[in-house]
Image (cartoon, rainbow, N blue to C red):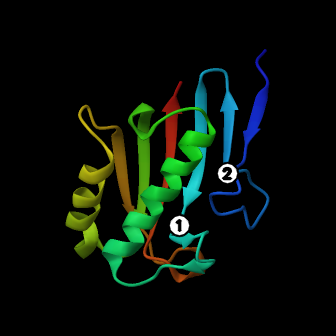
């Protein structure tokens, strides 16, 4: 039986509820959903959507690095967005952060997200 290990870094947004930034179990790391909180500026990035998406992937990158990994070790992304008109921007933003082969991905349209953001992304990575 493998144990789970909490991953936490002060360089990424701290959990606002009963969850961890990430959990490592064996050679898999499960990253909790990230929203567009800029830790350095201590503020939420809401406009424009491009900046919001960019901040989300920066936060994912930071948690990946705290796990001893890179974004390119992500095998699965789940993206939640409040408006599919922003879908092309999500793809453009991902091209800045990932190289082929891209992670498997699901994109789910939702009515709302925490803190009034327009995008949240969670991930699974393989070490």
Q: Position of residue 90 (x, y in %)?
A: 29, 62
User: Nearest the camera: 62 or 87?
Assistant: 62
Residue 80 coordinates in the image, percent (x, y): 43, 62
Vertical placement of residue 22 versus 35, above or below = above
Q: Is residue 111 above or below residue 27?
A: below
Task: Please tell me which residue lies in front, 67 or 111.
Answer: 67
Q: Is residue 85 rendered to the left or right of residue 70?
A: left
Residue 99: quadrant of the picture: top left
Dots 1, 2 in contact, CB < 8 A: no
The residue sitting at 76% across, 18% down in the picture is: 2
Give the CA distance from mark 1 to mark 2. Answer: 12 Å
Position of 70 with respect to 66 (left or right) is left
Does residue 3 appear to the left or right of 106 in the view shown?
right
Sequence order check, earlier mark of 1 and 2: 2
Q: State which quarter of the image contains the N terminus.
A: top right
Counting from the top left corner in percent of width and height, residue 76 is at 42, 39
The total of numbered circles placed on residues is 2
Identify the residue under disc 2: 21
Picture residue at 76% right of the left edge, 30% below the top: 4
Q: Residues within 10 Å of mark 1 (few under 14, many from 20)?
A: many
Which element carries disc 2, helix, strand or loop? loop
Residue 60: mark in rendering? none
Residue at 53% over, 24% down: 127
64 and 110: which is toward the camera:
64
Most extreme residue toward the top, as rendered?
1
Q: Secondary structure at mark 1?
A: loop
Kindly identify the residue that appears in the image at 33 percent across and 49 percent down: 97
Q: Which mark is residue 35?
A: 1
* Quarter where residue 57 is shown: bottom left
Disc 2 crowd, CA 10 A, few/some/many (<14, 14-19, 20+):
many
Residue located farthest toward the front when viewing the structure as drawn: 40
Place of residue 108 in the rendered image (x, y in percent of width and height, measured from the top left): 39, 60
């Amino acid at each position: 039986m493998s144990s789970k290990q909490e991953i936490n870094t002060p360089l990424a947004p701290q959990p606002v509820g009963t969850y961890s930034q990430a959990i490592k179990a064996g050679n898999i790391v499960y990253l909790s959903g990230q929203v567009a909180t800029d830790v350095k500026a201590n503020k939420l990035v809401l406009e424009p959507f491009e900046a919001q998406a960019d901040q989300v992937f920066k936060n994912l990158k930071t948690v990946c690095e705290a796990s001893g990994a890179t974004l390119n070790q992500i095998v699965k992304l789940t993206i939640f967005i409040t408006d599919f008109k922003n879908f092309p921007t999500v793809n453009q933003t991902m091209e800045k952060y990932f190289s082929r082969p891209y992670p498997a991905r699901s994109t789910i349209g939702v009515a709302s997200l925490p803190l009034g953001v327009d995008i949240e992304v969670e991930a699974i990575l393989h070490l």
